[in-house]
Image (cartoon, rainbow, N blue to C red):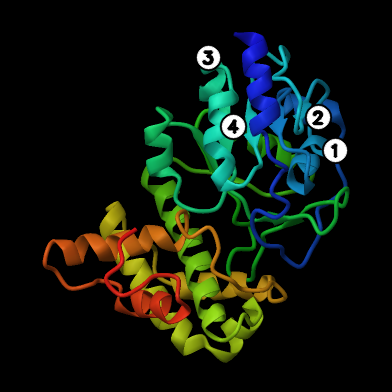
Amino acid sequence: RGSHRSRMFALLLPPALSLLAGSAPSPAAPRAGRGARMAGGDVPSIIVGGGRIGSALKELGVEGDVVLRRGDAFPAAPASGPIYVTTRNDDLAGVVAATPPERRQDLVFLQNGMLGEFLEEQGLPDATQVLLYLAVAKLGEPPIDGITDTNPDGLTTAKGRWAEAFRARLAGGGLTCHVKQGDEYTKAMLEKHVWICAFMVTGALHGGVTVGEVESAHASQLRALVDELCAAGEAALGVRLEPGAFERLAAYGRSVAHFPTAVKEFEWRNGWFHKISQRALAEGRPDPLPLHTAALQELGVVKEGARV
């Protein structure tokens, strides 16, 4: 069984996703010593993927960390602790399958998009998740924190079994991370999801302009879409966002103004909202997301009447 699982990892382990979120104006502070991070709650961990984010987590880590790259066998040690998954969303099922069943509760998912349905299907509804607002410009460079003028204490947020260990790892490098559970995490997750879906769609409608151009030149169009997505997301998830959601999302847009826009990973991102539209129409109710649906149709991402 062990050798079979090793072969599975060799086949299924993809290159790490190099950029999981955005960047912000200031780089991380110099790293603290390994002993200080260990005392603060960090523990030896497995890092799936050796790209920019995976390598950054290793650099921030402690003695005993192991990075799994394509072709590597699942290691015997560390035998406990977080397993940070820094791959593309479409590779997640393969990573879960290649992880020993007794270790799957240690998986930590750092991807964009709504992962809830996928995690339920995998039997991991309580898995540790991270809303990652970090970027690494080049392999080996220090990560840049997601700090904005409306959120000077940072935006990265984690929940679950290994959330405190992840926060300790980031803190060792002068990076911020909040730990939230329940509805507070759900609200943070919805805001990040609205940000990426609204900014990417609005930018794509204008030929793939930068995030900064979306925020500065198409603010009214962006606001209407953000309001629509927030309302539908709140209804679907049973939460209510704090006032000022648009201002917070616009501020993050300003902090990553140079980023390009494109509609990607549809199933995990805008597809989640489109399913809300499709369910409403199937039940004879009006589409709660008419602006979003029209934008997807204009971009050719979906056809009128198409189902996801």
Asked whether residue 42 appears in the rendered view, the answer is no
Q: Nearer the viewer, mark 3 or mark 2?
A: 3
> Which of the pair 24/308 is nearer the observer?
308
Q: Residue at x 58, y 83 (%)?
A: 214
> Which of the pair 271/305 is nearer the observer?
305
Reading the chain from its start, which is encountered first: label 4 or label 3? 4
Circle 1: element type: loop
Q: Nearer the viewer, mark 4 or mark 3?
A: 4
Say which residue label 4 marks. Answer: 95
CA separation in Å, label 4 and label 2: 31 Å
CA separation in Å, label 4 and label 3: 14 Å
Circle 3: element type: helix
Q: Residue at x 80, y 38 (%)?
A: 60
Residue 235 vs 225, above or below: the answer is above
Cβ–Cβ under 8 Å for marks 1 and 3: no
CA separation in Å, label 1 and label 3: 33 Å
Amino acid at circle 4? Val
Amino acid at circle 1? Ala
Amino acid at circle 2? Ala
Residue 68 vs 19, above or below: the answer is above
Q: Residues within 10 Å of mark 4 (few under 14, many from 20)?
A: many
Cβ–Cβ under 8 Å for marks 1 and 2: yes
172 relative to 235 in the view: left or right: right
Say which residue label 1 marks. Answer: 32
Q: Residue at x 76, y 39 (%)?
A: 57
Coordinates of residue 282 in the picture (x, y in percent): 17, 62
Say which residue label 3 marks. Answer: 102
Reading the chain from its start, which is encountered first: label 4 or label 2? 2
User: Which numbered disc covers residue 36?
Assistant: 2
